Image: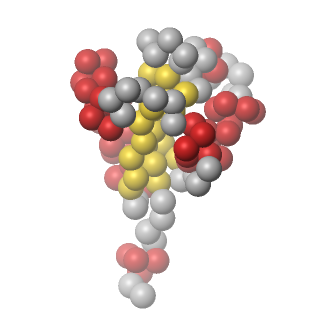
Amino acid sequence: MTIQKMRQHNYYVYILTNKHKNVLYIGVTNNIVKRLYEHTVEKTKKNSFAVKYNCEYLVYHEYHISIEGAIARETEIKKWRREKKDKLINSFNPEWKFLNEEVMAW
């Protein structure tokens, strides 16, 4: 096994919204199930953007094998206008279904 292969892990860029779908939160994590739990159940950071705007519904996620790639992608998406973010979500999840249960079952 090569050193590069040994360093590969699971990373996710994800987008959460509120129940009205009018606010977006973009994040990165190495454990999407745990992170989603933290956003929805624990609400660990009481003064965080996600908690303040009730962003706890997963509408988008993408997989990366390196943290550098995931962080670069998160940074890229955060710089986009809302319209472009909406197009990204629509290409992945046209109905904007809340994917929490699907992901939590992994």
Using residue 92 as the reference point, say whether residue 49 is left or right of it: right
Residue located 54% across and 53% down the image: 30
When asked about the image quadrant of residue 91, the answer is: top left
Above or below residue 5? Residue 18 is: above
From the viewer's side, name the closer residue of 46 and 91.
Answer: 91
Above or below residue 69? Residue 53 is: above
From the viewer's side, name the closer residue of 96 and 38.
Answer: 96
Residue located 41% across and 26% down the image: 96
Please state, as top left, top right, bottom left or bottom right, where the N terminus lies in the image.
bottom left
Residue 75 appears anywhere in the view:
no
User: Horizontal and vertical percent for residue 95?
Assistant: 38, 26
Residue located 39% across and 85% down the image: 2
Q: Residue furthest bottom?
A: 1
When asked about the image quadrant of residue 85, the answer is: top left
Using residue 42 as the reference point, say whether residue 58 is left or right of it: left
User: Horizontal and vertical percent for residue 54?
Assistant: 60, 17
User: Horizontal and vertical percent for residue 33?
Assistant: 61, 47
Using residue 54 as the reference point, say whether residue 80 is left or right of it: left
From the viewer's side, name the closer residue of 59 and 85.
Answer: 59
User: Horizontal and vertical percent for residue 101?
Assistant: 60, 40
